[in-house]
Amino acid sequence: MEASKYIFNQESYSVNAGEVTWESPSNIALVKYWGKKENQIPANPSISFTLNNCHTLTTVKYEQAEQLSFEVFVKGKREKSFEPKIEQFFSRIKEYTPFIVNLKLEIHTENTFPHSSGIASSASGLSALALCIVSIEKELDSTMSDAFFKGKASFLARLGSGSACRSVYPELVVWGENTSFENSSDLIASPFSGAHEVFKDFQDTILLVDKGQKVVSSTVGHNLMHNHPFSEQRFAQAHNNLKDLKKALIEGDLKMFTKIVESEALTLHAMMMTSNPYFILMKPNTLKIIEKVWEYRVKHNLNLTITLDAGANVHLLYPKSESEQALALIEGTLIDFCENKGYICDEVGLGSVKV
Ligand code: PMV
């Protein structure tokens, strides 16, 4: 697939003023994207669960103007600190959406999860904004198909934040060219619908170990994979893990699922600890939670699985049938390792929706 497919090239058009709203969820990677090339191309393929409850709701009000201008409001209050990231997003996408250079925009956004929870809002936030921009494009090109619409939203979201391209789609979503998933692409994500039904309502309880700002951003982390001593092995491993995970997902093999997903989480953090400069995003309580989950899993013969994103919080993944035991462990033990006993119950979700 060529990126040029997504260039809007209608010659004359005029935008009527209007507004559009999209809700888009966060996602949690099972095989992790860590390391990128130019133009937000991933160094290795990844797959994620789209979440349900953690999402961003974004409304864009737009009207024709001499030049691009925008303001961002969070829960009705102007939030200038968000504007540089969005400015960068617009400068990256304007080659594909030239009509934005003649728009005046008001962007109203809010998350369902607490802003200072240590949960990255870039995946949900930038996918919601990308979807709004493609909705404006659809006003100018009414022939646009639904498949093209989602593909373009994923393409644009990727330019804002890599993992955001996966949030456009439901359930299990693959991004990055690989030989295990047909039609996989570095430019857009695509949904994988062949998984066993146990994964349809998989649970993700996010244990909020540290609600603070990350000490190292994921942009810096991705860049440290250039000249990393283990990068080539890591990228090869991600391809293999994706192949093995696909099999586990199809067969409903929970033991294999746990083995691959936990190895991926720990490898991600091992990459951080072995880059130059090195850094650690886990906290002592991250390890305490992992230890307790592993102990309890063996004792009760369960399939509770931990994963981490680029932070200290632990995502506890489990089949819905194990919810009762998982919640007993969380309430009885794990909340003591969470900041202010905080955790968020989420589960696999159906992806972005137009409101
Ligand atoms: O999309 P970014 O640039 O914030 O990177 C996300 C990286 C991880 O969350 C650690 C892994 C992933 O695949 O989502």
Image: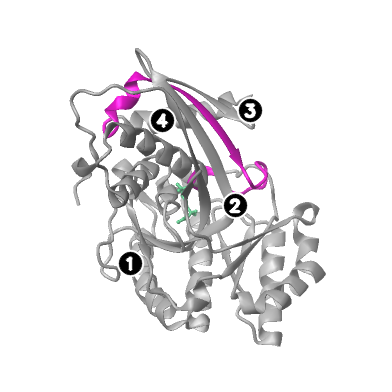
Nearest to N terminus: mark 4 or mark 2: 2
Q: Is residue 189 above or below residue 290?
A: above
Residue 54, disc? 2
At numbered mark 2, what does the secondary structure look like: helix, strand or loop?
A: strand
Q: Which numbered disc, 3 or 4, marks the residue closer to the eye?
A: 3
Give the image location of residue 24, x and y in percent: 50, 47
Residue 88, disc? 4
Pointers 1 and 2 in contact (CB under 8 A)? no
* Residues shaded magenta: 95-123
At numbered mark 4, what does the secondary structure look like: helix, strand or loop?
A: helix
Which of 234/141 is in front?
141
Q: How far apart in space, not on screen, are marks 3 and 1 (Cα)?
A: 46 Å
**Is residue 226 among the parts visible in the rendering?**
no
Residue 79 quadrant: top right
Question: Dot 1 corresponds to which residue?
Answer: 236
Alpha-carbon neighbours of circle 3 within 10 Å: few (<14), some, or many (≥20)?
few
Residue at the limit of the structure toward the top, as seen here: 66
Q: Amino acid at mark 1?
A: Ala
